[in-house]
Image (tube, rainbow, N blue to C red):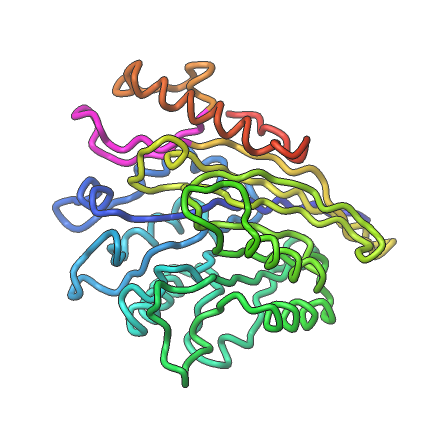
Amino acid sequence: FRSEVTISVVGDLMCHMPQANNAKTDSGYDFLPSFVFVKPYLEEADFTIGNLELTCAGQEKGYSGYPNFNAPDEYIVALKKTGFDFLVTANNHSMDMGESGLLRTIQQIKKNKLGYTGTFESQRDHDSVRVISVKGIRVALLNYAYGTNGAYPDASRRYMLNVIDSAKISDEIKSVKRADIDFVLVYFHYGVEYAGEPIASQKNAARWAREAGADIILGAHPHVVGPCRWLIPDANHSDSCFVAWSLGNFLSNQNKRYTDAGVILSLHLKKNFDQHKSYFGNVEYLPTWVYRGERSAKKMHIVFPAEWSVNNKHLPDYLDNELMNKMKQSFEDTDEIINRYGPSVKLKAIK
């Protein structure tokens, strides 16, 4: 018989101080309104993954945004309630609040019954490769970052953070490939901020991952959406590999052109159990845009399906013509960028 699963993935989940300030309530913080319009798309997938680019080190350390992020715990609560299942946590802000902040962030993720990889509590935790099994399809999840702004764990605790290293990537992918795995998904935090086109170090990391057997290679860090492409089978590779160089900002306070845009990337994965064969279905993308609470009528950061600007569907009154034009610009930018190398992904039908 056959099975199909949908894994949806988004880019950077950030919390600048204007976001926290807008989410403040009399009793704490509530970030749920930020996701209300994209929640149906996140929930409809069988499994949803995001890049958590912040720490939750506790209120006693003081909440802060750039350059050292410490967000309220309620941020992770909202992610769980919105439909996220798993967070990748290796990025250049993983150590913003030191080792204790890294560990407490993991504790909050576990408290909310979310999966994670990229940062770890112990050597045993590090060595326990994350494998999800949905409808009989098994996917291994790996996450690596280029670095952490110079603040690394102590040499005796290097297991706490996955950094990009060719030998490590190759060894870990080959190790999971020996298990009963259908797909290997590698999520990198790499590249140059605000540059959607991949640089040499990104191409090298992707090459190392593909040569070791990765099937899906995703990226974050540039804070802008980058192109996607299929790496087709060749003399050295028997299978296709899908690459999305950068998924952009899913939620942040950045507002320059391109930085207010992100995508929900939906990977449709299939398996024929009679033939013991796993293969890709299509890949879809939903462009998103962040409203930053600019209007007094609604002081909240909110993620919108950007295509709503084209058909004026469901739009609230506080989105005036200026903001509508920004959303439309974002949609058109993403639509042009994502298939720049040729038809790789399809625009998802909106609700």
Residue drawn at x 56%, y 43% as measured from the top left = 45
Q: Residue furthest toward the right?
A: 275
**Is residue 299 highlighted in magenta?**
yes
**Is residue 89 highlighted in magenta?**
no
Q: Residue furthest toward the front?
A: 200
Residue drawn at x 59%, y 28% as measured from the top left = 347
Say which quarter of the image contains residue 214. bottom right
Q: Residue furthest toward the bottom?
A: 156
The foreground one among 32 and 1 is 32
- Locate residue 100 relative to residue 63 in the image: left or right: right
- Locate residue 310 relative to residue 184 in the image: left or right: left
Location of residue 153 with respect to 96 vertically, above or below: below
Provide residue 181's location: percent of width, then percent of height: 71, 63
Provide residue 255's location: percent of width, then percent of height: 31, 34
Highlighted magenta segment, given as a residue range: 289-306
Location of residue 320 with respect to 175 vertically, above or below: above
Number of residue marks: 0
- Locate residue 299 relative to residue 152 in the image: left or right: left
Residue drawn at x 44%, y 32% as measured from the top left = 288
Provide residue 11's location: percent of width, then percent of height: 46, 46
Say which quarter of the image contains residue 178. bottom right
Provide residue 115's location: percent of width, then percent of height: 48, 61
- Locate residue 60 relative to residue 120 in the image: left or right: left
